[in-house]
Image (tube, grey):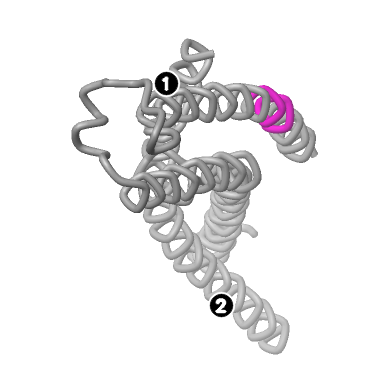
Amino acid sequence: MSEAPAGVAIQGEESRDGIGTTLVGVIALIALGYGFYRLIRAVDPGHLEARADHGVLELIVDDRTTLTLIRLGVIAFVAYLGWSVFMLVRDGRPVTSVAGVGVAEAARVAQHAGEAAVDQVRRLEDELAEANQNVEFLLQYVQDLQEGATSGDDAADQPGNTP
Amino acid sequence: MATIDNTRDRHLGEVVADVKHSRRVLEDSRRERLALEAQLRSSGSALRQSSRRRGRLFGLLRIAR
């Protein structure tokens, strides 16, 4: 059937798309990680006796405990981003399951299969309707034959007529 | 002759009953198909909308790259 190759084509397209997404995700992750690394380095107070940076964030992050918590948060966020991109590539759905963003390949294949099945049902219905119509024509023909035979018999029964 | 007529009438009656049954099956099938088509239209629309959003998301990722 022609529907099966269509599904295969969709799978191939998704696969190529997944490779591109993987590259984009990896590059985006590296860029994000580097950016966060620079940000943390910028607010790192360094050794207590040798503070060199005097940025605005340093006024907020003025001790190592807070800085450690921020670092852990950034690491968790980057790990979450990586996991989300991985799930997006693997299942077509990010971890956040944003409504309408993730498209599972299975849903697309099922949609095509459903449309093909409905088309086939429609064709079968058309053929069945045509068959019903043909049978009705035949029944009507038989009924006409019967009526003709009956009227012929009645006419033959009339006096003066020959069958 | 009467036996032939009876057999013929019985066969004709069976054919008429089959046609009626076929019509009912056809109507049921059409009703279910229309419901399925409505569901497929809805899911197809959601799928296309979702695909567009996904395409935009990937576009943003490419731009970010």
Give above or below for B64 relative to B49.
above
Image point 39% across, 34% down: which residue?
A: A49
Magenta: predominant secondary structure element? helix
Q: Secondary structure beneath disc 1?
A: helix
Give above or below for A5 relative to B32.
above
Q: Amino acid at mark 2?
A: Gly
Magenta segment, which residues?
A14-20
- How far across and how far down the image is residue B17, in percent? 53, 75
Q: Do circles 2 and 1 both sit on a common chain?
A: yes
Give above or below for A150 relative to A20.
below
- How far across and how far down the image is residue B23, in percent? 47, 63
What residue sits right under mark 1 in the picture? B56
Q: Quadrant of the C terminus of chain A?
A: bottom right
Q: Which quadrant of the structure image shows residue A42?
A: top left
Image point 37% across, 33% down: which residue?
A: A45
The single residue placed furthest to the front in the displayed view is A49
Crowd band around label 1 with a 10 angstrom C-alpha radius: few (<14), some (14–19), many (20+): few
Q: Secondary structure beneath disc 2?
A: helix
Residue A134 visible in the current orientation: no
Q: Nearer the viewer, residue B57 or A154?
A: B57
- How far across and how far down the image is residue B37, in percent? 42, 47
- How far across and how far down the image is residue B30, in percent? 44, 55
Q: Amino acid at mark 1?
A: Arg
Please check the rendered image and state whether residue A18 is part of the magenta-colored stretch, yes or no.
yes
